[in-house]
Image: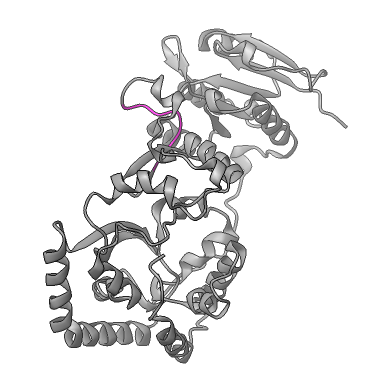
């Protein structure tokens, strides 16, 4: 049975909400917090409140504080709207337990109304809420695993150091630039991830040209000269410098807002060109091809192991933008395990000839992470994975 809901809206976007799908609902619009407090004090209790953050002479959070001080309004859901995303406003709203926070320019109004219907049905008074008792899953690095990591990493670096110095010299002589590169990765924390450079400097610019000609994921009719990450968000472009319509994501050397990233991702999915993967990539140097085929470019990650950022065996650390997408409990469980140079899904992937779905990869990551709950860790299981990794170290291509 549909609810009969009366909404109090404080702000200047009354036309934003359409009640055509909720014909038994009503909305009362007031343009400032003074009128809103008088309305509430006259014993006209709405079923839900939607409030703009920017109000004349005040802001929506101050009004929220006043409303929550009145115990009789404890059950009324409160939704805050902001004309653009501001991380400080968002953090404050979260800390104060405001029921939800939306950016109207990137939000469908029906989503807000559906959220109100849900809150009116299931929301409990804040003053009576009890903190849910959640069994917190805690990661603890087994001592034997850490000792093994230090021993293996230091031994390999010591034995390989003369050869590694020759490789570093060869990289430097073949092309200008640093012999290594650093990217941000996420494991148990965000850290600097090290690899030897296998491409010429200026590869990002060259990638734009190659994406059209050699991207093996592009259909012929959908190839484009533009890297989607270089196309500016039209909503952000309309805002003053330094402001964005939604949270900013960092993808390699690019910055893109969450709204525009999802628009580009949907477009790429339709065109079957989500990833840029170059066949016989000419950006790769001759030395780079050799160190990739032999996995020598991964050796600097042993420094990450010595620093405690990574382990020899674990779940592969993710780029920041990928880690941000893993918010569900069933997805984020993978982070209970340490990030590793090799792991379960890598050896399983090789065994399947390189064919594996994202769902299966996540399942394998979670399977390995389960070892770190309730002291289920097996040192010999790690040794088995290392032995299975050795045949996969040599690969035939540079893709």
In the picture, residue 115 is in which quadrant? top right
Helix, strand or loop for the magenta stretch, by majority:
loop
* Camera-side residue of 276 and 385: 276
**Where is the C terminus found, in terms of image quarters?**
bottom left
* Camera-side residue of 36 and 5: 5
Position of residue 384 relative to residue 212, above or below, is below
Q: Where is residue 125 in the image (x, y as percent from the top left)?
A: 64, 37
Point out the residue furthest to the right here. Answer: 1
Check if residue 247 falls in the magenta segment. yes
Write the residue at 57% across / 55% down. 328
Q: Position of residue 81 (x, y in %)?
A: 53, 24
Position of residue 74 relative to residue 240, above or below, is below
Write the residue at 30% across / 86% down. 147
State left or right for residue 306 relative to residue 139: left
Please, which colouring scheme is shown? one colour
State left or right for residue 12 relative to residue 18: left
State left or right for residue 283 relative to residue 334: left
Q: Position of residue 225 (x, y in %)?
A: 41, 39
Check if residue 381 falls in the magenta segment. no
Position of residue 383 relative to residue 109, above or below, is below
Residue 350 visible, this orientation:
yes
Point out the residue furthest to the bottom here. Answer: 380
Write the residue at 31% across / 27% down. 242
Residue bounds of the magenta highlight: 242-249
**Where is the N terminus found, in terms of image quarters?**
top right
State left or right for residue 147 relative to residue 259: left
Q: Position of residue 219 (x, y in %)?
A: 56, 48
Write the residue at 41% across / 19% down. 238
């Amino acid at each position: 049975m549909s609810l009969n809901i009366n909404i109090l809206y404080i702000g200047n976007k009354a036309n934003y909400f359409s009640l055509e799908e909720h014909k038994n609902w009503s909305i009362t619009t007031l343009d400032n917090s003074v009128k809103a407090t008088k309305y509430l004090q006259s014993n006209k209790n709405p079923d839900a409140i939607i409030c703009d953050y920017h109000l004349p002479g005040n802001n929506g959070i101050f009004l929220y504080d006043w409303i929550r001080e009145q115990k009789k309004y404890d059950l009324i859901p409160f939704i805050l709207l902001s004309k653009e995303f501001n991380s400080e406003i968002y953090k404050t709203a979260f800390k104060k337990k405001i029921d939800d926070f939306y950016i109207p320019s990137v939000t469908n109004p029906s989503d807000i109304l559906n959220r109100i219907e849900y809150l009116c049905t299931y929301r409990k008074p804040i003053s009576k809420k009890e903190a849910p008792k959640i069994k917190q899953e805690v990661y603890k690095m087994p001592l034997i695993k850490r000792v093994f990591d230090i021993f293996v990493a230091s031994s390999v670096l010591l034995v390989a150091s003369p050869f590694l110095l020759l490789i570093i010299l060869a990289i430097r002589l073949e092309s200008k630039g640093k012999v290594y590169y650093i990217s941000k990765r996420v494991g148990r924390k965000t850290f600097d991830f090290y690899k030897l450079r296998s491409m010429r400097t200026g590869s990002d610019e060259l990638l734009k040209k190659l994406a059209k000609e050699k991207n093996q994921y592009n259909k012929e009719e959908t190839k484009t000269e533009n890297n989607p990450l270089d196309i500016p968000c039209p909503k952000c472009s309309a805002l003053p410098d330094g402001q964005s319509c939604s949270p900013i994501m960092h993808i390699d050397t690019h910055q893109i807002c969450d709204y525009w990233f999802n628009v580009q991702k949907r477009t790429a999915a339709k065109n079957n060109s989500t990833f840029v993967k170059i066949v016989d990539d000419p950006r790769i140097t001759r030395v780079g091809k050799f160190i990739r085929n032999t996995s020598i470019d991964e050796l600097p990650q042993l420094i990450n192991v010595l620093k405690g950022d990574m382990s020899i065996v674990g779940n592969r650390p993710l780029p920041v933008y990928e880690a941000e997408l893993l918010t569900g409990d069933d997805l984020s469980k993978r982070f209970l395990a340490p990030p590793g140079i090799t792991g379960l899904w890598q050896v399983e992937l090789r065994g399947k000839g390189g064919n594996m779905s994202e769902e299966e990869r996540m399942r394998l990551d979670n399977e390995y992470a389960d070892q770190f709950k309730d002291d289920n860790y097996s040192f010999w299981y790690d040794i088995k994975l290392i032995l299975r990794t050795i045949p996969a170290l040599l690969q035939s291509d540079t893709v």
